Image (spheres, rainbow, N blue to C red):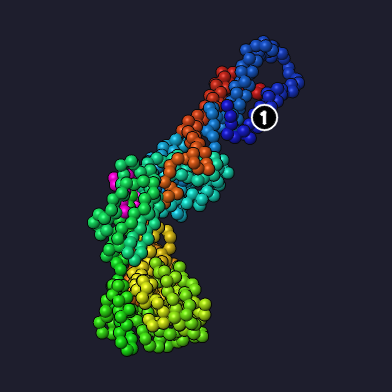
Amino acid sequence: MSFGRPDLLWLLALAAPVLLLHMLRRKRQRIPISSLVLWERVVAAAPRRFGAGLLASLLSLLLVLLALTGGALSAADPILGSEAPPPRPLLLAIASSARMRSERFKRALQLARVEIARKAPYDPVTVLLVSDRPRILAAGQTDAARLIEALSRAKPELVPAAWDLAGPAIADVLGNSGRAVAIGVRPEVPSGTAILPVGGENSGISDFAIAVTDEKVRVFLRFSGQGPDAEVVLTLDGAVVRRARAREEVLLTLPRADGGLLRAELAPATGPIFDDAVEAVIPAPPALTVGVSATGVSDPFLKAALQVSGALAGDGEKFDVRVVAGQAAPDRLFPGDWILLTKPPVGLGYRVLPPVPVSPIWSASASHPVMRGVDAAEVQVLGATPAEIPEGAEALLSVPGGVVAAAGEVEGARYVWIGLETGNSTLPVTGAFPLMIRNAIAWFASLHSGVLPPAIRLGDPVSPAIPLPRGTAAVIATGPGEGERTVVPVIDGTFAYRPGEFREGEVRVAVGQEKHRTRLNAIYPEETEADPVSTAAPLVHAEDRSKFRSTEQRIWPWFALCAAMFLLVEWFVDRLRGTPFSR
């Protein structure tokens, strides 16, 4: 037995003054009387020293002491049984990531409900939803019904689970002798946390990369946990274009054709939608129109090179690419694409260097798109006027005396300059010349259609795949979905747009009058395994608090009742005696 108010046990000390008062006797007084005849009868009737009167007096004293003891113990609040342990905080950290969608999240919520049912009634519970920004659904709540209601409001989000952000909250609960339970896929939590892994779909596309060239589209896919009969299906605008067995890594190549919405899908489907499909926007190669400004007789080599390039002849004054041949280069280029077959364009910042005699090509760029597939070793220079190129331009062909071909951009105008004329080099009679013209037009076309990458991982910023034209101050971005238009500043030819709505879908970017598209795909390879052993935290079985019930019984009313009964019996005994016990 224990006492809720042990400080009131001092009331038992009141028994001492009761005993003292009982032992006190009045001093006998001597009274002179005239006769003893009548008093002899009184003395004869008086109780003896050890008679019934003395026993009644002792019984009355005992009853008073018992009543006093019962009252003191009742005031001290006596308690029988085992005391319940102190409240122990419980933190339920539930992953709310993209990998927890569908049935897996339902299983996670069921595990959380089991933990709530196992807790002691007075244990406070905090429910933490772990997504990219963990949020609290319930804080320090002991009512199980309210906790279940809070769980019903939980929904998975299309984001990764940031367990590192939930770590401080878990560590704080563990530091205060509480319990922490992590429920989800691959929780990386402090040691001592009870981990309840949620099994389920771990297969699907775990990584991707899509590259678009002038003629081909390359699709790289990495799969995790796919079945032996699974295959990847490529569709372009709904039409199947390729099928292949879904191995761990797959690389597929297909013609670029006219572009469209490319979808790579795992069949049969094994997981959430975002696990099994990746979408990309393949821009159609624009058919650029070319206008030629030349003096004298038309250059047959140039005409043949333009025919090979597939460019179309422009109508009137509207041209996508302007070719200047056989005359001085303009001092200023207005925005657009230019091919300059002229002497060094001084107006663009080129400095003319002394002419060079017969010489082979000394060096050629291997990185610029205009030089792709060009073999400059077969080109001989019979005489040329080289130049020193300005800052920002890139040399394409060089001789010992300087640069004879370059590419660059100035004030929104992109250009390719080739200073080797048809009569002073072997360039036109080799395959290098038509190939450079074709590559130049294809490079300009890519700048029109390939500003954005075809697909972007959700969470990464939307940025251009190529530098934007100089002078572009801002672009207008929209999406995914029909969101608000956002003005995004352009710095050093690039920008970074983060959509306000974090979900899969299409993003549209307007660069001047040109509109470009890309697709956002949710792929989270860091959450493709549900094995808790691979994490830093051990698997700890959750403590069953349902057995920690209080068996305490407060019995002070019984002591109070006993005290009242003792006083009642003492009163009855005193009435039978006819005199108070203290006389």
Which of the 4 image quadrants contains residue 531? top left
Above or below residue 562? Residue 468 is: below
Which of the 4 image quadrants contains residue 22? top right
Q: Position of residue 472 (x, y in %)?
A: 41, 77
- From the viewer's side, name the closer residue of 221 and 379: 379
In the rendered image, residue 265 lying in the magenta stretch gets the answer yes
Q: Quadrant of the N terminus?
A: top right
Q: Position of residue 556 (x, y in %)?
A: 54, 30
The residue labelled by disc 1 is 13
- From the viewer's side, name the closer residue of 267 and 70: 267
Q: Quadrant of the C terminus?
A: top right
Q: Position of residue 149 (x, y in %)?
A: 38, 46
Q: Position of residue 528 (x, y in %)?
A: 41, 46
Q: Which residues are magenta?
A: 264-275
In the rendered image, residue 301 lying in the magenta stretch gets the answer no
Q: Is residue 239 visible?
A: yes
- From the viewer's side, name the closer residue of 370 and 129: 370
Single out the residue that lies furthest toward the left. Answer: 239
Residue beneath the point at 48% across and 30% down:
547
Above or below residue 31? Residue 193 is: below
Q: Amino acid at mark 1?
A: Ala
Residue beneath the point at 55% across and 46% down:
171
Crowding around mark 1 (Cα neighbors within 10 Å: few <14, some 14 to 19, many 20+) is few
Q: Is residue 440 visible?
A: no
Relative placement, left or right, of 579 versus 30 is left
Residue beneath the point at 47% across and 51% down:
162
- From the viewer's side, name the closer residue of 417 and 241: 417
Residue beneath the point at 47% across and 43% down:
182
Above or below residue 540? Residue 351 is: below
Which SS class for mark 1?
A: helix
